[in-house]
Structures are given as structure tokens and as C-alpha cells.
Amino acid sequence: AQSVAQPEDQVNVAEGNPLTVKCTYSVSGNPYLFWYVQYPNRGLQFLLKYITGDNLVKGSYGFEAEFNKSQTSFHLKKPSALVSDSALYFCAVRDTAGGGADGLTFGKGTHLIIQP
Amino acid sequence: NAGVTQTPKFRVLKTGQSMTLLCAQDMNHEYMYWYRQDPGMGLRLIHYSVGEGTTAKGEVPDGYNVSRLKKQNFLLGLESAAPSQTSVYFCASSYSVREAFFGQGTRLTVV
């Protein structure tokens, strides 16, 4: 069965500094990887995905993520953090081994706090 | 383009009562999902559907039933609500195995 680990419950970053939110995964086949953001009392918004191809993927709001197959990681990054980036971030994976139709498996989420 | 719409947005139930949560999507997606979100536990899959008339169990299906009579709708039912089902419920849909799009959620409290 697939799984996702987000090792940090909370990440604190000063505004203007680079940020990284960590994610590692475990699958039987090849992974499809996703990052979502959730603002208070809202649904999840899709940020970016890795399906195949270039290991560095770019997404919405200046975010990017790097797929590292050997380390089974898909860390979310942004060169310069904004206070408005403060939110709850989820990493998710689909395992293509079983076709991938049985939903995304999510990590427990990481609270990102950007301090002015 | 509404995307994924969930109704109701809030509900309070008494233990033992039943209710149905409705999810509607207008993106012609084949795949639809119901998740629950609890603090510190991320999102957990309850049931999912890969097409009209088909449903399957996810990670935490006990106490819930689902139906997908129309492609655009996915219903989640609680036959006899329990306090452990107090949660925020999210519906999502996707085009095949690509990214899923989520509704705004239903906050359910069982007292």
C-alpha cells in the first residue's frame, strides 16, 4: 500500500527567505505526486504535480517541487516566502502499480507559518 | 464553471440519525472520491467511484455508504450517525489518475 510522510508538523520561515516543506513517499510502482494547499475553512487547492519527465516541476503562486526517485522524496520549495503563503500544505501520491484509480493518499499535512 | 459542489456546508446530527451528503461536479470526470479530514490525520479515503454505477471501499469505509447513479453526482450516506463521525468531509473528482479537484467541504458534528 502507498504512504506519504510529512515529517514536520510546522515550518516557520521569515518573509523573504526561501522555504522548503518536506515529503517522502512509498509506493509499489511508479508514483504520481501532488501538492495541495488548504487555507482555513476552505477546500484543498491543487498546487503542482509530478507525473513524468523533468524532476523539477513548477506550479501555482511561485511554488516548485523536486522529484528525487532515489530518496523517494518530493519536497515543496519557494525561493522567497510571502506572509500570504501561510497555510496547511499536503503532499499526496497515487501508486500506478494498481492503476492508480483508488484515490490519492495524503500525508498528515504541514503548517507553514511565514513571519513578517 | 462551479467545479465540485458539496451540500450541505454544515450539519449537526444527533447520534443515531441518518443523513446524505451530496457532491456534484460539472467537469465530466469519471473518478470521484469522498474523504474525511480530522486534525493531525490528514485526509483519509472513505469510498471512491471510477464511473457511473460503480463504487469501492477506501481506507475508512465503515459506517458509510455511497451511490453513483449519475456520472456527475456522488452521494455519501450515514445510516446511523456516531460521534466518531464528527469530521469535515470532502468530495473530489479527477480526470483519470491525474490531480483531483476538491469541494469546499461539509462540517458535520454528531452529538
Image: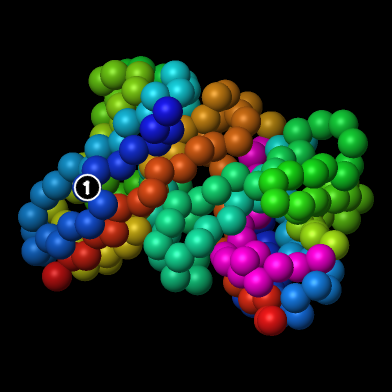
Tell me which segment is drawn in magenta.
Answer: A80-95
Q: How many marks?
A: 1
State yes or no: residue B67 in magenta: no
| Residue at point 9%, 58% (across, down) | B16
| Residue at point 82%, 42% (across, down) | A57
Task: Confirm whether residue A78 shows in the render.
Answer: yes
Type of colouring:
rainbow
Going by the image, does A59 lie left or right of B97?
right
Percent x, y for residue A62? 76, 52
Residue situated in front as seen by the camera: B44 or A47: A47
Going by the image, does B46 lie left or right of A101?
left
Quarter of the picture containing the C terminus of chain A is bottom right
Percent x, y for residue A40? 45, 65
Percent x, y for residue A61? 70, 51
Q: Secondary structure at mark 1?
A: loop
Residue situated in front as seen by the camera: B60 or A75: A75
Going by the image, does A19 lie left or right of B94?
right
Residue situated in front as seen by the camera: A82 or B9: A82
- Amino acid carrying label 1: it is Pro
| Residue at point 53%, 58% (across, down) | A38
Percent x, y for residue B71? 35, 19
Task: Confirm whether residue A33 shows in the render.
Answer: no
Quarter assignment of residue A50? top right
B4 is higher (above) or lower (below) than A21: above
| Residue at point 49%, 66% (across, down) | B41
Q: Which residue is mark 1?
A: B8
Residue situated in front as seen by the camera: B55 or A40: A40
Which chain letter matches label 1?
B
B87 is higher (above) or lower (below) than B28: below
